[in-house]
Amino acid sequence: MLRKAKKRDALSELLAAASHKVLSELISELANEIPDVRRACFDFLKSHVSVSKALEKRSEGEAILVLWSELAPDLEELDMYGGGDYATQVLVAELLDQIRKRLESKGVDADHRREFLDLVLPFIESGNAGMDDMLDDVAHAACYDDGDLRRLAQAYEAMNNEWKTGLARAIYRRLGDRDKYLELRTVRMANGADYHDMATFYWEAGEKEKGLQVAEEGLRKAKGRMDKLRGFVAARAREADDREKYMALQFDQTTDDLTLEKYKAFKQLCSAAEWSFFEPKIVLQLKQARRSERLKIRMHRREYDQAVALLSKGHYPMSAWDGNYEIQVAKKLEKRYPEEILKYYLSGLGHLNRNDQRKEYARKAKVMAKVRHVLVEVLDDKPRWEKFARKIKQDNLRRSAFQQEFADAVPDWGELSGPG
C-alpha cells in the first residue's frame, strides 16, 4: 500500500523562498500591528540570537512596554468606571504580574523604565481602577537604584494624598534621607502606627532615648492602631526588667479587641498573683468584645448562665450550619437550660404560615428538628411537641414543598395528624 504523500505547507515554502530583507519587513510589519506578535518576537529572538547586554536590556524594555500596551485599554476602562467585570480584572492583574516579574529580573534599561513609570503613575494617582497594590508593586519594581526610588518618592509626594505621602515617606526612610522623612512624618501624627513608625526610626538610627520619648508620647496621645506601638514599648520594658509596666501594656494589648485566644495567651503570661489582679479587670472589659468572642470566653470560663443569656438576647442565625460555634454552644447547653435553648431554636423558624422558596423550607425543617429534639428527648414532653407541630402542619397542608422538606428532616412528621 502506497503511503499518502505529506501535505505541503505553502507558507513554509514561501518563507523559505523569501530573502532576509523580505522576512525582516514581514516580521516588523506584523510586530508593529499586533502586540502579542511583537512580544513573542522579543522573547524568541533573545533566546536564539546572541546580542550585546545593552540591546538585551533595551529589548526587554520594549517587551514590557508591549505588555503595557496590551493591558492599557482595559486598565483605562477599569479606571474610568471604578472597576469592572471579573475577567477583565484577572487579565489586567496577570499582565501586571508578568511586567513585575520582568522588571524584578533587573534586565531593563533605564530609559524604558522611566518611560514605563511615566505611564503607570497617572493610574496610581487616580487610584480608581481597583489595582492600587499591583500598580505600586510594578512602580517599585521599575526602580533599580536610589535615583529611581527618589524620583518615585517625589511623584508620590506630588500627588498630595495621605496614602501616597506615606509611600513617599517610606521610600525616604529607606534611602536614609532623614530630613525628608521627618518633614513628611511630622505632618501627620494621629494613630499608634504613626508614632511607632517615628519611634523605630529614631531607635534604628541609634537615638534610643528619642525613640522611647516618641513612643511614650504615642501611648498618651494616639488613637487607634496601637498594637505595634504597645509592642515596641513592652519590649523595652521587658529589657529593663520593668515587669509592672510590661504586664500593664500586655493587658492593654489583650483587651483591645478582646478574643478568646488573646485571653488565653495573657493568662499564660501571668503569675498566679498577677492573674488574680488582672482577671476581674478582663471580665469588666468583656462587654466591649464582639458577641461571638464574649460567648467563647464565657464558655471557656464555664460561666454557662452568662453564655445562655447571650444566646437568649440574640436570634438563631438564618444562614447557620451545624458547625457554627453558636449552634454548637446551644447544643451543649440544651440539658442545662432546655427552655432557654428551645426559645433560641424557635427564633430560627421565623414566619411559618407563608409561601417561601424550597431552600428556606429546608432550612426551617432542620431547625424544627432541633425544636422536636428539645421537647421530646430533652424535656420528655411529647404531647407538647405534637400539639405545637400539628398546628404548623395543618397550617401548611397545601404547601407540598414545605411538607416534603419537613418530612425529610423531622422525625415522625408524617405521623402527625389532626388539629393541634
Image (spheres, rainbow, N blue to C red):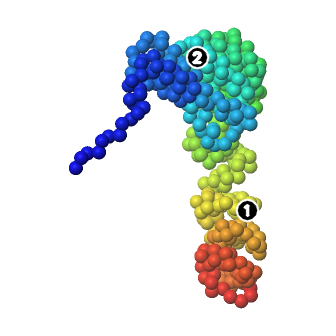
User: What numbered label is drawn on residue 34?
Assistant: none
* Amino acid type, callout 1: His
- Mark 1 crowdedness (10 Å alpha carbons): few <14, some 14-19, many ≥20: some
| Percent x, y of residue 106 | 50, 18
Please, is residue 214 above or below residue 404 in the view?
Answer: above
Name the residue located 58 percent from the left edge and 60 percent from the top edge. 323
Q: Decide if residue 273 is in sight here.
A: no
**Position above or below: 290 against 176:** below
Distance in Å between CA atoms under marks 2 and 1: 58 Å
Residue 342 at x, y = what percent? 69, 71
Relative depth, front residue between 159 and 381: 159
Residue at 70% x, 62% y: name it. Answer: 318
Label number found at residue 315: 1
Secondary structure at badge 1 equals: loop
Name the residue: 63% across, 38% down: 89
User: The disc labelled 2 sits on which kind of residue?
Assistant: Arg
**Residue at image x 67%, y 53%?**
292
Tell me which corner region of the image, top left, top right, bottom left or bottom right, holds residue 15: top left
Q: Nearer the viewer, residue 287 or 193?
A: 193
